[in-house]
Structure formats: C-alpha cells, structure tokens
C-alpha cells in the first residue's frame, strides 16, 4: 500500500496535533474519539444511545497492489465522497485506518436502524469506481456498535465495532453485523475452537474415516471416500461441517488437508489394489497453483498409484476461481488422478461446469436421492442426470442411500454406483479393514501378510 494510504498524525508531547486525514479530507481517529467524547458528555445525564459503524472495503488490497497506490488513493477519495453524501444529517465520517472508515450516527439507536443505514452505505459503495481508463467494483463489510450497550467508553465501543466487523468479514463479502453479547460469545467460541483445532492438527488428533462406495448391481465395494473426523477431549465430536470451513477461513486448510490425505493414502495401501480412494479438495485449494504438485508429492511419497486416487470437488469450489481450478484439474488428470464433481444438481450452473471442465465422475446429491421414492420430480431429475452422464461417458454415484428401496430404484434408473448408510457408515482404518475382510472372502489369501490374520 502506498504511503498516501497510511494515516500518520502529527504528535507533539504525546498529543495529536492533526485531526484530519490528509488524503481524503475527512477526520481521522482522533476526530472520531473527540466526537465520541462530545456525544457521550452531552448524554451523560440521559444516556440516549447512538451508533458507531466501521466500514471496510472488501478486496481493496489486491486492487491497490494491481493498479498501484495512486489508483488506491483515488478509490479511497471516492469512497470518502460517497460516504459523506449518503449519511444522514448530524452524522460524521472519518477515515479510521487504511481502507477502513468510521461513521458516527447520533440518531441511530437500535439494530433495525443500524441495518437500514448499513444497507444504504453498502449499496452506495458497490457502484463502479472510475479510474479513468477503467472501472473497478468493490463491496463493503460493516460492523456496528451501539452506545452504551456495546461499550460506554471509546475503546470498548470501538472494540465491539471491530468484533462486529470481523464477524461480517468472516461471513463473506458485503455483510452487516450489529454487535451483541451473543455475537461476542460466538466469536470467543470460534477463537477457542480454532485454537483447539490447531492443537489437534499438531498432535495428529484429526483422523480419517472411510465410507464404502459400492456397485448397485451386487453390493461389491469399489472404493472408499475419506472423511475427516475430530473428537476433542473437551468439545467432544466436532462436525467437519464446522471445523473444515473454520480451517479454510483461518488459512490452515492446506495443513489439515495434506495431513488427512497422507493418512488416507497410507490406509489405501492396505486395501486390494482395484479399490480407489476418494478424497475431498476444498474451494481454497482450487485457488492455489501449488495444489496439484503438493497433492501428487504426498501420493508419490506414500507409494499410492495416482490412478487409484479420486479427488472430489464441488461446483461452488470450481466457480470461485474457474481458470485456476481448470489448470489444477488438468494437471492432476494428466498424472492419472480422477476428478469427481460432488453434490451435482445443487449448484446454479452444473451443466455449464460439465461443458467447461473435464470430469470422470458425477455424484448425485443426497437431497435428490433421499426423495427418490416419494417425490416424482426428484426421480425425474435423477433419471435425467443419469441419462445425460451416460451420453457424456461419465460415471455416476448416488450419495446418501439409506434404504433398500432407494438402492433398488436407483439401479432401475441406470445408476451403477451408490454410497450411504445402507451400505456402510464411515469407519476408521481398522474397522474398514474388517469390513473388507467380510466383503473379500479370499482377500487374506491374496496377501502374503494379511492384515486380517488377527480377526
């Protein structure tokens, strides 16, 4: 970020001399603090509420880096102008820090009012920014804190606003959060969960379980999907639907995924060679150009044939960075790894993904499978998917099969592979070997040192 992007107030004998941000002409943090003191003093006898909002530009740094600090400064000036133009009478805008602005709202007393002005600000800042020879678009995230409920002194109120803003940023772009005690507790729990997960990864406490994928014709096992499982001594069982997105958000999904892939690949070495291992890649990994190389390095170091590995990706993950995802998929397939499109039918443009990318398999989402025997529309959708995949020479797996009726109906529709509790729940590596020993009556005889000799 260029020098002009940074606020550096003049200080003499410990006190700020300047209350103005030189770039935008707005007040700075010292002006914000002065306004807070003035308002809180006015309302000392009758502490009527007022609000402070923090406004942060989503994705400003990449634009600043790409187009240079002068373009970044121009955007900041345009943001300042828009904020001044859209705030109500009596309100004040300051440039809080870098690409973050603060708004003091003396007449916003409660959550509904805060959300209303927040949506107005968000809409105003989402319009294109004119940089002369190009236009760029940005969104904004906002965090509100209401005095005195979220803090009766300046530092506490600002920390509350920062907590609300942080929650907005974690939820995605263009979000609005109004601070509450419940949100503060949620953020504390999230921080505690993050630390526990980091420790679990360090201590190798996150495990892999395996769920069978079978032939619907005869129930024979064709492979297993690896699923992450974490049981914390204090927290108990933590769903991967909670801790995987947390790892993605906090930037250590690569470490978690690579640890689990290594464990899963080592387990797959103990299975018959014709069985494949299915493993999930996250959306974050599909934006990283080194993903293919790191994945293949792990598989090769363990000694698993890449042709036995199947990587599952979701349509949402592909859409987040289509060009990079395409390159990663191509590199992996060139090495022999197969690619499955997971949760098919739940995205917004699944057919487009099949046209743009080369997949080996499609997994029909359990939302359709669970209703196939009771809902005619779901049955027609599943039938259409199977017919389409046959024409495209794609294998099909139906997920979430829980009853014989569902398995029978799917087979009648032409689906050849299935997965779900009806065939087997996820189990750890040793239980998976016991499952295989029952499925393969001659498995022990085909291995010189049978892993089933003690069962």
Image (cartoon, rainbow, N blue to C red):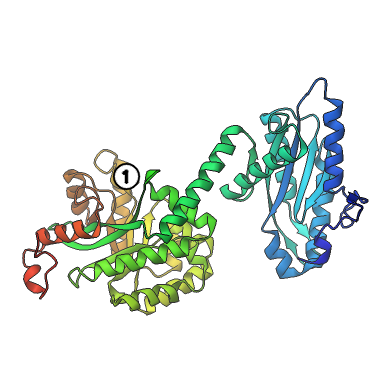
In the visual, does 325 lie left or right of 269? Answer: right
Whether residue 310 is visible here, answered yes or no, is yes
In the visual, does 325 lie left or right of 83? Answer: left
Q: Determine whether 184 is above or below 345 in the image.
A: above
Q: How many labels, in total?
A: 1
Quadrant hosting residue 225: bottom left
Q: Residue at 32% x, 44% y: name it.
A: 378
Q: Residue at 83% x, 20% y: name it.
A: 45
Report which residue position mark 1 lands on.
378
Q: Residue 125: percent from the left, percent from the top? A: 74, 49
Q: Determine whether 339 is above or below 101 in the image.
A: below
Q: Residue at 71% x, 68% y: name it.
A: 65
Q: Residue 276: percent from the left, percent from the top? A: 25, 68
Please, which residue is most extreme toward the front here? Answer: 13
Which quadrant holds the N terminus?
bottom right
Q: Determine whether 249 is above or below 114 in the image.
A: below
Quadrant hosting residue 77: bottom right
Q: Residue 379: percent from the left, percent from the top? A: 28, 46
Q: Determine whether 42 is above or below 145 in the image.
A: above
Which quadrant holds the C terminus?
bottom left
Disc 1 is placed on an element classified as helix
Q: Residue 308: percent from the left, percent from the top? A: 27, 72
């Amino acid at each position: 970020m260029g020098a002009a992007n940074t606020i550096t107030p003049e200080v003499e004998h410990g006190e700020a001399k300047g209350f103005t941000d030189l770039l935008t002409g707005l007040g700075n943090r010292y002006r914000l603090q002065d306004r807070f003191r003035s308002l809180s003093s006015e309302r000392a006898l009758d502490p009527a509420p007022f609000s402070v909002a923090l406004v942060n530009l989503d994705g400003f740094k990449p634009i600043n880096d790409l187009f240079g600090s002068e373009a970044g400064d121009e955007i900041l000036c345009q943001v300042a102008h828009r904020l001044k133009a859209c705030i109500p009478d009596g309100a004040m805008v300051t440039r809080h820090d870098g690409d973050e602005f603060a708004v003091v709202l003396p007449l916003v007393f409660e959550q509904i009012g805060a959300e209303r002005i927040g949506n107005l600000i968000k809409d105003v800042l989402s319009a294109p920014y004119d940089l002369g020879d190009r236009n760029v678009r940005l969104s904004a995230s906002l965090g509100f804190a209401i005095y005195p409920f979220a803090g009766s002194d300046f530092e506490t109120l600002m920390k509350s606003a920062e907590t609300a803003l942080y929650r907005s940023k974690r939820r995605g772009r263009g979000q609005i959060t109004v601070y509450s005690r419940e949100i503060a507790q949620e953020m504390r729990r999230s921080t505690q969960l993050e630390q526990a997960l980091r420790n679990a990864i360090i201590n190798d406490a996150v495990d892999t379980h395996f769920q069978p994928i079978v032939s619907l014709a005869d129930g024979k096992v064709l492979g297993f999907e690896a699923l992450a499982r974490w049981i914390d001594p204090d927290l108990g069982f933590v769903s991967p639907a909670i801790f995987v997105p947390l790892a993605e958000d906090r930037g250590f999904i690569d470490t978690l995924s690579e640890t689990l892939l290594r464990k899963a690949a080592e387990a797959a070495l103990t299975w018959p060679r014709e069985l494949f291992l299915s493993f999930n890649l996250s959306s974050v990994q599909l934006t990283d150009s080194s993903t293919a190389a790191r994945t293949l390095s792990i598989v090769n170091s363990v000694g698993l044939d890449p042709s036995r590995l199947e990587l599952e990706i979701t349509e949402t993950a592909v859409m987040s960075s289509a060009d990079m995802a395409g390159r990663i998929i191509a590199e992996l397939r060139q090495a022999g790894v197969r690619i499955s499109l997971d949760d098919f039918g739940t995205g917004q443009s699944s057919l487009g993904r099949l046209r743009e990318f080369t997949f080996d398999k499609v997994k029909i989402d359990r939302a359709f499978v669970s209703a196939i025997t009771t809902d005619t529309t779901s049955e027609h959708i599943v039938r259409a998917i199977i017919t389409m995949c046959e024409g495209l020479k794609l294998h099909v797996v139906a997920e979430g099969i829980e009853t014989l009726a569902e398995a029978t109906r799917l087979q009648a529709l032409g689906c050849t592979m299935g997965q779900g509790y009806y065939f087997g729940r996820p189990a750890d590596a040793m239980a998976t070997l016991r499952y295989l020993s029952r499925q393969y009556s001659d498995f022990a005889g085909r291995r010189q040192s049978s892993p089933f000799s003690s069962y």
